[in-house]
Image (cartoon, rainbow, N blue to C red):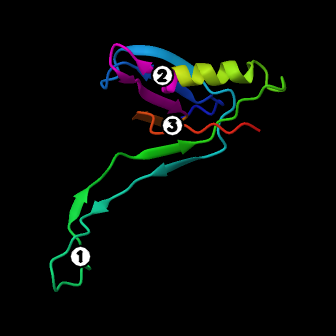
């Protein structure tokens, strides 16, 4: 439960899927104004000949997805902000870099207020404005 203090979203990377071998940790410079959590249920789309298909059989539930937008500021307005490129490189090193020991990107834990979410990066899009 949140203690009412403003906390930055923290991303911790781990080398193992049990989240015991911590690699590194970063906090985003500016908290996102929102996040989207997607929960999907997949059903078999195939149906037997002559049926209406209004009761498709359950297939699986893919992993939940979270989507965030982060802001990296290079104007100096935000206290403690870094050069944009070095901030992005540090971010990519934590969430995207392929680790030689495990031959894949690290596992991630996102911590922000009441949110604690174990995950892996699915995609990363960087818009420069």
Confirm whether the magenta stretch covers residue 100. yes
Q: Residue at x 19, y 75 (%)?
A: 47
Q: Nearer the viewer, mark 3 or mark 2?
A: 2
SS of the residue under disc 2:
loop
- Vertical placement of residue 89 versus 120, above or below: above
On the rendered structure, is 54 left or right of 72?
left
Residue marked by disc 2:
97
Quarter-wise, where is residue 29 in the image?
top right
Residue marked by disc 1:
55
Label 2: how many residues lie within 10 Å, few (<14), some (14-19) or many (20+)? Answer: some
Q: In what quadrant of the picture does the C terminus appear?
A: top right
Q: Residue at x 73, y 18 (%)?
A: 82
Q: Residue at x 23, y 84 (%)?
A: 52
Q: Nearer the viewer, mark 2 or mark 1?
A: 2
Residue marked by disc 3:
114
Mark 2 and mark 1 lie on one chain; the one further toward the N terminus is 1
User: Where residue 16 appears, x then y in whole percent?
Assistant: 32, 21
User: Where residue 117 appears, x then y in whole percent?
Assistant: 43, 35
Quarter-wise, where is residue 109 in the image?
top left
Q: Residue at x 55, y 34 (%)?
A: 113
**Magenta stretch in the rendered image:** 94-112
């Amino acid at each position: 439960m949140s203690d009412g203090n403003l906390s930055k979203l923290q991303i911790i990377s781990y080398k193992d899927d049990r989240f015991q071998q911590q690699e590194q940790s970063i906090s985003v410079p500016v908290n996102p104004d929102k996040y989207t959590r997607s929960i999907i249920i997949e059903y078999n789309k195939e149906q037997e000949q002559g049926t209406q298909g209004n009761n498709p059989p359950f297939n699986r539930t893919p992993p939940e997805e979270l989507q965030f937008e982060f802001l990296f500021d290079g104007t100096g307005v935000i206290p403690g902000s870094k050069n944009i490129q070095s901030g992005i490189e540090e971010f990519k090193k934590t969430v995207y870099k392929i680790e030689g020991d495990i031959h894949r990107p690290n596992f991630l834990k996102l911590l922000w207020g009441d949110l604690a979410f174990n995950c892996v990066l699915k995609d990363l899009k960087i818009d420069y404005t």
